[in-house]
Image (cartoon, helix red, strand yellow):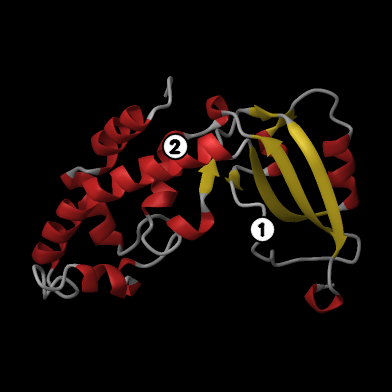
Amino acid sequence: MQNITKQTLIEFGLTHFATASYIDKIIKEDKFCQHGSWLSDCDELFENFETKYPNASNCKKELKSLLTEWMPRRVNYIANEIIDELNHYKKLYRNLYLSKDKINSITNTKERVPVEMVGVYWSSRNDTYSFSPKQITETDKDVLLTIELETITVDWYETFVSRIDFINGDQEQEFRLLEDASINLLNLKTNEVPKHMLTN
């Protein structure tokens, strides 16, 4: 997507997500996205519409009507949030656990860093945190990466997918990057991993 404005974001969101097929997908999977929250856990969403759709939590037809009404509002909200973040934040952050070898590979990259080396999930929040991997060793470090926020590297479809999530979307302020993009690494900060988190 070129020329990122509130209007282009709204049009993009409505075209891809305010559709019967996308809403049906959410209902069928009971999730906003693969890595997102369960739709059935969104009590506040149901409460916001309980006067008009009192049986939405257990009636799929009524739930579809609720989501059909809600989705354009959500798209408009997401567009506002993204534009606000683009205006105020010039950096993205990612926190993860990395081995010393991986850290060296990243810091020794002379040009821009390939996204495949560091992952696609980033946030405009500098207090973002990592979900603990299954294996953390004594040589691993807790790493906070900081990159330049460049709209050309953003996967806008997947960014919308993450932000539509009623529970996690607002908290994570996620920007998903294109898998084949490269990024301008501004900073790499390491901390020791607490001993209680080590798995071997």
* Image x and y of residue 91, in percent: 65, 39
> What whole-number distance in Å separates the C-alpha atoms at marks 1 and 2?
20 Å
Q: Give residue 19's quadrant in the image.
A: top left
Residue 172, above or below 16: below
Residue 110, above or below 194: above
Q: Secondary structure at mark 2?
A: helix
Q: Give residue 178's quadrant in the image.
A: top right
Residue at 49% over, 34% down = 155
Residue 39: assigned label? none
* Image x and y of residue 98, in percent: 80, 53
* Image x and y of residue 51, in percent: 10, 72
Write down the residue under mark 1: 127
In the figure, is residue 163 to the left or right of 178? left
In the figure, is residue 134 to the left or right of 79? right
Q: Nearer the viewer, residue 44 or 60?
A: 44
Give the position of the C terminus as an image quadrant: bottom right
Q: Nearer the viewer, residue 101 or 168?
A: 168
Residue at 63% over, 35% down = 90
Write down the residue under mark 2: 83
